[in-house]
Image: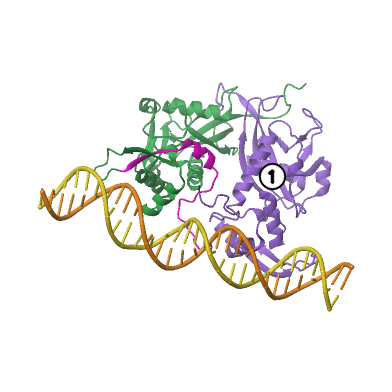
Chain colours: A green, B purple, C orange, D yellow
Amino acid sequence: MMTRYPHNTRILVATDCIIFGFDGEQLKLLIIKRNFEPEEGNWSLMGGFLHENEDLEVGAKRILNDLTGLNNIYVEQLGAFGKVHRDPVERTLSVAFFALINIYDHDQEAVKAHNAKWFSLKEIPALIFDHDEMVSMALDHLRYNAALHPIGFELLPEEFTIPQLQKLYEAIYDMQLDRRNFSRKILSTGLLIDTGWKNIHSTTKKAIMYRLDKVKYQKKFYAFWNFIPNPNPNHG
Amino acid sequence: MMTRYPHNTRILVATDCIIFGFDGEQLKLLIIKRNFEPEEGNWSLMGGFLHENEDLEVGAKRILNDLTGLNNIYVEQLGAFGKVHRDPVERTLSVAFFALINIYDHDQEAVKAHNAKWFSLKEIPALIFDHDEMVSMALDHLRYNAALHPIGFELLPEEFTIPQLQKLYEAIYDMQLDRRNFSRKILSTGLLIDTGWKNIHSTTKKAIMYRLDKVKYQKKFYAFWNFIPNPNPNHG
DNA sequence: AAAAAATTGTGTGCTATTGACACATATCAA
DNA sequence: TTGATATGTGTCAATAGCACACAATTTTTT
């Protein structure tokens, strides 16, 4: 029995998290100001090295918990970033994870302790290494997947109104959507349950609060949606 | 300036390739019979360790070229597989790559030399490590993406007929499609160029040979298609 | 107290696309 | 010449998409 593969180089493996949140108006990204070398003082995704006996997703969730105090975060693996010189200190392969959190749920003290801050998409500063590329890929992933799967709900509180949901989609796609068509589409999926409550925070007509039907959500995750109006109606 | 990150474990990084081909009737997977330990004699995806100064995709293409003799293979990264004990010898992180090739284009001698063989999807033997999971994920990826993007063409020769393309889609989705509706949909994309030739190999009516309009292909890659009839017509 | 402003809920009609299905055409074999 | 098989094109009803109008609710203003 072999105990090692001979003659091969072992390299460092890290995990970086692209963390999206929604404040009701804008889509935001949570990043940290590094207080360690290299690139100390510059902005970076939250990340860390993988532990010796730790699975990838476990490592990502440990890092996310560390920063936000949250445990049940929606994460998907984005992929591995392995360019030889992406880290100037030593070759490091990073597995990027895409995370969606409810921005009002997290531990704000932990975020402060890590020198972390939420940035609107259009105000994100330059990031270290290849983190800009990771963010860009994560945003594409979000736009691509939110049009086909009901993942947007991960960014909202348990109970939400249709206008809130619409604002989220408008923020994700940076476009205006028709209120009436959006409402019809979203209700026709049958994924929303009327809680019987109304949004008491509104200053005008109080919108109905809904919650996600989690059973149907699981079943329909792969049934294709199309929330975003077809950008190219006549396949020209 | 630092030269190494202290106190962190370095691990082996490998690449495994999930290689799909289409023989005109069936979708097939190319796998190898291992002639080295561990798991010698068992079936496995084609893979190998990443070289010291090699980028991930370069490593995958090196491995693909090694097996098939081909250079311009369509590859996408599927993701990193990093479970602690996925390789019994030593912890190894594998980055899986999804590859589509024209089955009649490759170097059959090289394939034989590697003890490799094409298997129909329904006849794939059990594979080593977590390779079954990789194949399953790759197949999901293919089904998911072929419905939205024109990647299916990667599996066909430069010139092909609409009935051939239809058979490919039927193989991918393991379902029958309506000839007339399929033809209408595919032609309405404007992605196909009539070469003026006809399929001389046919024994009955010779179908028109088309080729892909590569300029439009690039432009339309992200314009959503929907080749597969809606599985769930009334979003119920 | 009534009107205005803002926001939310629901409806209508036109058009393009979809999916089910029929018929005409081309090629080879019997 | 006829039959068998495969290919190309057409029709039509049902549906879904999109543009748009109107009614209802709540707070603020007059």
Q: Residues within 10 Å of mark 1 (few under 14, many from 20)?
A: many
Horizontal placement of A159 versus A83: left or right?
left
**Residue A46 is a magenta residue:** no
Quarter of image, res D12: bottom right
Horizontal placement of A130 versus B135: left or right?
left
Seen from the viewer's position, the closer of residues A185 and B166 is: A185
The kind of secondary structure the magenta stretch mainly shows is loop
The chain under label 1 reads B
Seen from the viewer's position, the closer of residues A10 and B227 is: B227
Tell me the residue at 62%/42% (across/down).
B77
Picture coordinates of residue B206, whole percent (x, y): 76, 68
Picture coordinates of residue B182, whole percent (x, y): 63, 60
Horizontal placement of A181 versus B161: left or right?
left
Secondary structure beneath dot 1 equals helix
Picture coordinates of residue D27, whole percent (x, y): 19, 43
Q: Look at label 1 and name its amino acid.
A: Lys
- All told, the count of numbered labels is 1
**Residue A222 is a magenta residue:** yes
Picture coordinates of residue A200, whole percent (x, y): 27, 38
Seen from the viewer's position, the closer of residues A58 and D22 is: D22
Seen from the viewer's position, the closer of residues B60 and B146 is: B146
Tell me the residue at 34%/38% (across/down).
A196
Location of mark 1 (residue)? B61
Whether residue B122 is visible here, answered yes or no, is yes
Whether residue A49 is visible here, answered yes or no, is no
Task: Give the residues in magenta.
Answer: A207-236
A140 relative to B5, above or below: below
